[in-house]
Amino acid sequence: MNQLTGTVLSGSNNVFEVESFSEDDGSFIIRSCALKSKRLKSDKKYYNPLAPGDVVQIEVDSLEDKKGQITALVPRKNEFVRWNVKGRSPQLLAANLDYVILVTTPEEPDFRPRFIDRELAQAERQGIEPVILINKCDLEGSQDESFLKYVSIWEKLGYKVMKISAKTGEGMVEFAHFIQNKLCALVGQSGVGKSSLVNVLDSTVVLKTGSLSKKYGKGSHTTTKGTLLRIKLNESLTGGIQGAVASIIDTPGVRRFVLHDIESKDLALYFREMSPLVGKCNFGLSCTHINEKGCKILEAVESGQISRERYENWKKISEEIKTGSWTD
């Protein structure tokens, strides 16, 4: 039986679309592949056994060339996950990434810095470089003082922040250049415009975009499962260069991003301004960083070395982890 290596594009219910290279004619073939590996089938570690971006071994069906079976998973370079509240288990969103792109907006839906801080902590935990992408920068909220202040905080911490507008095209040339020849995942709450962004990058990829729910100020769920898209970047974004490509995993929008595999006592390790101070307090690793004398993190907050906004978000997220109640 023909054995090949391929990349998972999408999938659900243990059936996945897998892309593999054909040496016969130099083209890529997409096959519908079921799980054959008992280990993958029985792996209860995740809500879903595979994610877009996973590299797998497949056996091609001897009767139907467009079908096959997944026999093994090639070890991942990395994986981006969240806790799936409904499924009560961690959910793989993407694998083998160069960047995780955290998409947010100044308004429509409302700016939620704690949502982004959770995603940043998860990215730090997974060892994936995050990029904060602010869409809808044509809106008035992009000039709001509190919004600009928090964006500045992220930039000072060394996070790459890019401001764009899928509607007006602002910043799209720089973004297209940044993701060229990379594998990135777009992650964010519903309504931030991930699908609209993809449509601007490649006009031949038509993704459904949903209008914002006026009742709740939240986006409608238009992407129901993660999909790896092979993007042919529009020449208007590449200075006329033909054949420029990127790979983007468009993940489903979520109302809440719930952390996985991060305990409250360890959260400071994934806030990059706090991490170097962990263990240096008078009470060492027992310090809660709330009210202890000699706490190096509290001293850094008082001196302005650590922003009070990020510290307050760290406290709230720590409490969310303890209680299991994720409010924003």
Image: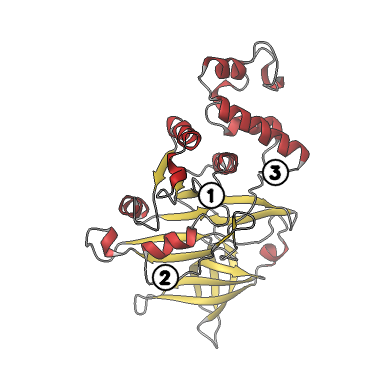
Quadrant in which the N terminus appears: bottom right
The residue that label 1 is drawn on is: 78
**Residue 219, position as x, y percentages in the image:** 58, 58
The residue most toward the bottom is: 63
Above/below status of 303 relative to 60:
above
Locate residue 42 relative to residue 156 in the image: left or right.
right
Q: Is residue 236 left or right of residue 46?
A: left
- Three-letter amino acid code at the position of disc 1: Asn
The answer to whether residue 60 is above or below residue 109 is below
* First in sequence: mark 3 vs mark 1: 1
**Residue 290, position as x, y percentages in the image:** 69, 21
Farthest left residue in view: 240
Under mark 3, the amino acid is Thr
Q: Amino acid at mark 2?
A: Val
- Which tag, 1 or 2, sits closer to the chain's start? 1
Q: Position of residue 225 (x, y in %)?
A: 59, 65
> Do the CB atoms of the residues marked 3 and 1 lie less than 8 Å apart?
no
Name of the residue lying farthest toward the right:
323
Ranked by sequence position, the earlier of labels 2 and 3 is 2
Q: Nearer the viewer, residue 155 or 47?
A: 155
Residue drawn where x is 57% and y is 21% of the image: 277
Q: Nearer the viewer, mark 2 or mark 3?
A: 3
Reading the image, the residue beneath label 2 is: 205
Is mark 2 in CB contact (under 8 Å) with mark 3? Answer: no
What secondary structure is marked by label 2? loop
- The residue to which callout 3 is attached is 327
Spatial separation of the CA atoms under disc 2 and disc 3: 35 Å
